[in-house]
Image (cartoon, grey):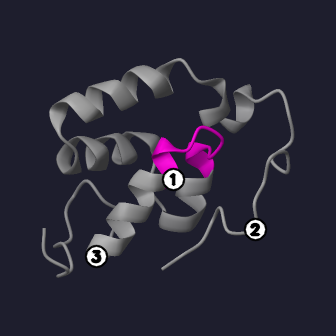
Amino acid sequence: MSSKQHPVNAQWPKGKSFNEGDISRVIEMAWEDRTPFEAIKTYYDLTESQVIRLMRKNMKTSSFKMWRKRVSARKTKHLAKRGFKVGRAFCPTQYKRG
């Protein structure tokens, strides 16, 4: 994948395009057990279904399937299902941009 901006697509928020670094960071946040989809929405304006599409498009099939299996069983990926406050196990660099 090149470092060029990805073209705007109907799947993504209007006027949004993502470079390779953005895509890499979204994938990293999605893999993190304690980073909820709401955090990705806040930083990148992507819904859960848009994150899933991004993951499917940018990962090997086997890696995507493994991630989906993990994330589907994880309550920590959704703020409404979490049994603890967002501050728990928080690292200041967890939500880095760039």
Which residue has dot 3 on it? 19
72 left or right of 43? left
- Marked residue nearer the N-terminal end (2 or 3): 3
The front one of 81 and 92 is 92
The Cα atoms of the two marked residues, 3 and 1, are separated by 16 Å
Looking at the rendering, which quadrant does residue 96 occupy?
A: bottom right
- Marked residue nearer the N-terminal end (2 or 1): 1
Which residue has dot 1 on it? 29
Say whether residue 30 is magenta: yes
Q: Position of residue 77 (x, y in %)?
A: 60, 35
Q: Which mark is residue 94?
A: none
Q: Position of residue 44 (x, y in %)?
A: 48, 65
The residue sitting at 20% across, 80% down in the picture is 3
Specify the amino acid type for callout 2: Pro
37 left or right of 54? right
**Element marked by disc 3:** loop
For the residues bearing labels 3 and 1, Cβ distance under 8 angstroms: no
> Where is the N terminus found, in terms of image quarters?
bottom left
Q: Position of residue 51 (x, y in %)?
A: 38, 47
**Element marked by disc 1:** helix
Specify the amino acid type for callout 3: Asn
For the residues bearing labels 2 and 3, Cβ distance under 8 angstroms: no
Q: Residues within 10 Å of mark 2 (few under 14, many from 20)?
A: few
Which residue has dot 2 on it? 92
The front one of 83 and 38 is 83
Can see residue 70?
yes
The Cα atoms of the two marked residues, 2 and 3, are separated by 24 Å
The residue sitting at 21% across, 58% down in the picture is 10
Q: Which residues are magenta?
A: 29-38
Looking at the rendering, which quadrant does residue 65 occupy?
A: top left
Q: Residues within 10 Å of mark 3 (few under 14, many from 20)?
A: some
Specify the amino acid type for callout 1: Met
